[in-house]
């Protein structure tokens, strides 16, 4: 069985419409386990800013010239007492097929919105 060829390239501003659709699909997926998300429309990312920044890189995955996946790496500073002093934060991971999702899971990735917060509503 021949495997399809996936091409990877840097995102450009012309990719914004499809990347904005991906963002909404990510939000839609995460609503099922994050009941505290505000009602639509919401956005997580300033995608235009991420594409233009020097300390970030947004990548898109293409299958037969159609964008089918995305992700970004952003250089962040660690808290003063951690090493290394900087690290790459990975986000906006989106894949439109089951085999891509299974590949992520096989590598140990899992959906996660984990943040600790005190519930003061009670």
Image (cartoon, helix red, strand yellow):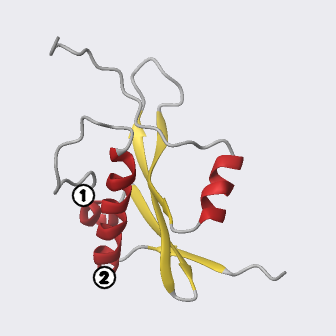
Image coords of residue 20 (percent x, y): 29, 68
Q: Where is residue 4 drawn, in percent x and y?
A: 70, 81
Point out residue 62 in the picture as x, y percentages from the top left corner: 54, 79
Q: Is residue 121 left or right of residue 8?
A: left
Label 1: which residue? 46
**Horizontal arrangement in the rendering, residue 110 relative to residue 21 (left or right):** right
Q: Quadrant of the N terminus?
A: bottom right
Q: Residue at x 66, y 41 (%)?
A: 108
Q: Residue at x 47, y 65 (%)?
A: 70
Along the viewing direction, whichever of 40 and 15 lies nearer the viewer: 40
Q: Specify whether 38 is left or right of 57.
A: left
The crowd level at tag 1 (other Cα within 10 Å; few <14, some 14-19, many 20+) is few
Q: Quadrant of residue 12?
A: bottom left
Q: Quadrant of the C terminus?
A: top left
Question: Alpha-carbon neighbours of circle 2 within 10 Å: few (<14), some, or many (≥20)?
Answer: few
Given residues 93 and 119, the one toward you in this image is 119
Q: Secondary structure at mark 1?
A: loop
- Tag shown at residue 14: 2
Q: Residue at x 68, y 56 (%)?
A: 103
Q: Secondary structure at mark 2?
A: helix
């Amino acid at each position: 069985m021949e495997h399809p060829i996936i091409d990877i390239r840097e995102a450009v501003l012309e990719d914004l419409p499809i990347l904005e659709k991906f963002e909404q699909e990510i939000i839609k997926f995460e609503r099922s386990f994050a009941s505290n998300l505000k009602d639509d429309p919401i956005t997580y990312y300033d995608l235009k800013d991420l594409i233009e920044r020097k300390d970030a890189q947004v990548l898109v995955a293409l299958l037969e010239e159609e964008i089918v996946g995305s992700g970004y790496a952003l250089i962040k500073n660690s808290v003063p007492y951690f090493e290394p002093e900087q690290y790459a934060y990975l986000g906006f991971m989106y894949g439109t097929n089951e085999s891509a999702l299974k590949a992520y899971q096989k590598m140990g990735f899992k959906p996660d919105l984990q943040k600790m917060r005190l519930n003061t509503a009670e």
